[in-house]
Amino acid sequence: MRGTARKTIAAALVLGGAACIPSRSQPTAAPAPTAASEWPRAFGQAAADARESRLPAADRVLTDFAARFPGSPEASEVPYWRALLKLDPANPAASHEALLILDAYLADTTPRQHRTEAATLRRLQSALEARTAALAAIPPAPVVKPEDRAKDDEIQRLRDDLAKANAELARIKRRLARPK
């Protein structure tokens, strides 16, 4: 009986231990991405693209994010960041587009995290455009090149020589025209 009791206890331990082994469970579904969870990655990618002067790529990352999570607080700030990228001097053709984006951002009456900054950027860009237009209206000052200066000096010297020759010729004509 002793051998049978040991076998029974061993069998119970084996079966009891097998119950403790985790069974293959169904894989749990990953939680659906949210704007709050995806924003740090998207913003980080856009910032990295901007640092590398890949401004169209950075703009595309932000635009895609806003399209994936419309209505989220993070997506409502995307226009501000897009306008900021378009105001980069390395992106001069997009400055007018930046003003349009800032106007739309400021026109929305819902609370915005960067409203003050956007208004300031809007005024700064408007002032820069006005000054640029005023400077463009000023005719450029003629640039005097050293070779042009030498030509001008030579022409003046020749005019002076011609004037002296004409004066001498006039003096000779007067002398010949006097009766003797």
Image: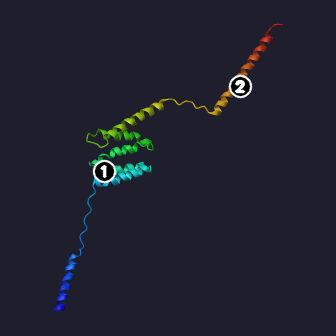
Secondary structure category for the residue under label 2: helix
Residue sitting at x 27%, y 55%: 34
Colour approach in the figure: rainbow
Q: What's the mark number on residue 34? A: none
Picture disc at residue 67: 1
Q: Residue 13: horizontal and vertical position, in percent?
A: 20, 82
Distance Cα–Cα, label 1 vs label 2: 75 Å
Query: Which residue occupies the extreme top position in the image?
Result: 180
SS at mark 1 in the image: helix
Horizontal side of residue 9 vs 94, given as left or right: left
Please name the amino acid that badge 2 sits on. Answer: Leu
Query: Where 171 falls versus 97 (above or below)?
Result: above
Q: Residue furthest right?
A: 180
Position in image of residue 14 (x %, y %): 21, 82
Query: Which of the 4 quarters of the picture holds residue 125?
Result: top left
Q: Amino acid at mark 1?
A: Ala
Residue 87 screen position, x and y as percent: 40, 42
**To which quarter of the image does residue 151 belong?**
top right
Q: Which residue is mark 2?
A: 158
Give the residue at x 31% y 54%: 38
